[in-house]
Amino acid sequence: MSFESLGLSTELLRAVAEQGYDQPTPIQRQAIPIILQGKDVMAGAQTGTGKTAGFTLPLLQRLSEKPAVKSRSPRALVLTPTRELAAQVGESIATYGRYLPLRSAVVFGGVKINPQIEKLRRGVDILVATPGRLLDHASQKTVDLSHIEILVLDEADRMLDMGFIHDIRKVLALLPDNAQRQNLLFSATFSNEIKQLANRLLNEPQLIEVARRNTTAERISQIVYPVDKGRKRELLSHLIGQGDWRQVLVFTRTKHGANRLAQQLEKDGLSAAAIHGNKSQGARTRALAGFKNGDIRVLVATDIAARGLDIDQLPHVVNFELPNVPEDYVHRIGRTGRAGREGEAISLVCIDEHKLLRDIERLLKQPIPSQVLTGYEVDPTIAAEPIQNGRNKRAGGGGRGGAQARHRGGRNGSGNNGQPRAAGKRRPAGRNGNSRNRAPA
Ligand code: AMP
């Protein structure tokens, strides 16, 4: 099937052709004709499936076919959970819409609000936003959402995970009645919470589901390297150097852990950067750009920061620490082996993480092959420590490599040995219950 047969205009086909896409992806094949008909859609699709073009192309076409009622107010609103995803959707809109006279803007927190206000004042047709900053604009009356014709919730499950449900409700209250607009909901998973949101939001939605990319795990070879916590960094540097990996995405459980690891890798002579919610937007954008263009070899990320990142053809993903939530493992390793290429997902697993590993294997319904690397055998005298909310109780854990850590048989003896580990909560960023105050990680 070609893009031409989907009913897209010549302006859009031209922009698509310039991207070098020969064929629509399955989600695009299904979503584009339905959205062009003006129907509401509930789509199950993850990052990497081509979902962004799947909603952006028909959205652009529908707006370009109908004149605006009010010239300065946005006509389409795309809500995303993270700043990175907002920026990427904004880029897609600019790319696919380059031959159409539609104006777009992206607003998210962590950057100055005044340039956004200025842009909104000049008038935009399509607004891409994270919920918190959008509500800031709404409260300052710098945006008028009463003329929205099309609403897209992108990665709706992530928005709920990140505690944005109240913000989403507030945004919905500012829009025209939902029967008067077209509503598109994209989500990788369909929990009961998502279904409730969909019931509230969508009118007779068409359901679209494409195979979960991550279940096609044949493209991804997975391996566990058992290793003591204090030697993980040393092993990681060794693997990167020995394998001559040019681009590797490394996951840690905490922001602090990400920072520390990036600094240590730099000391090992590997160009590295950390990406997480405490970084300024500028730093995050620079890190991502550096990683994409090859200046940065190792990008260390927390789970939430990595969501929605459009990084293609990643050959190696490393779980420096296993996630507390088994589903996050699936999301993490889904970053590799894209577009039919082979990918390798490596997990460095210390004794504290055995329960997390078992939970992941239960979810995958298969064991992950494990291999002890010569020189990195685990020290049998080290006992497990509990992991709570992403952090080990042991002070300074995970940081020290080499001989110092290897002989650290006498740990601080916190007295927790042998106790069951708390598997941690879903929201690593959630110390503060108020989601408006919580920067997307
Ligand atoms: P997404 O799932 O929207 O994050 O898209 C993942 C990647 O697929 C992006 O880098 C797009 O540029 C790319 N892409 C989208 N549509 C197509 C297509 N029809 N053919 C090839 N690549 C595509």
Image (tube, helix red, strand yellow):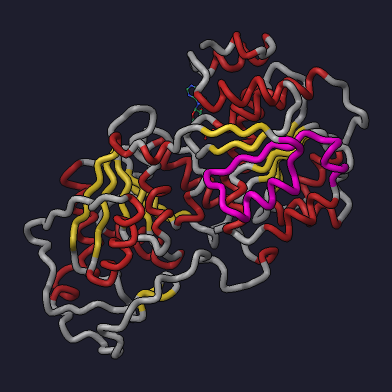
Q: Residue furthest left?
A: 374
Answer above or below: position of 22 versus 123: above
Image location (x, y in percent) of residue 15: 61, 16
At 30% from the left edge and 83% from the top edge, which residue is drawn? 419
At 33% from the left edge and 77% from the top edge, which residue is drawn? 396
Q: Residue furthest right?
A: 70
Start-end of magenta stretch: 175-204
**Residue 195 on the magenta segment:** yes
Q: Quadrant of the C terminus?
A: bottom right
173 horizontally vs 328: left or right: right
Q: Quadrant of residue 203?
A: top right
383 horizontally vs 312: left or right: left
**Residue 75 visible from this viewpoint:** no
**Residue 291 visible from this viewpoint:** yes
Q: How many marks?
A: 0
Q: Quadrant of residue 418?
A: bottom left
Answer above or below: position of 361 versus 144: below
At 16% from the left edge and 46% from the top edge, which residue is drawn? 242
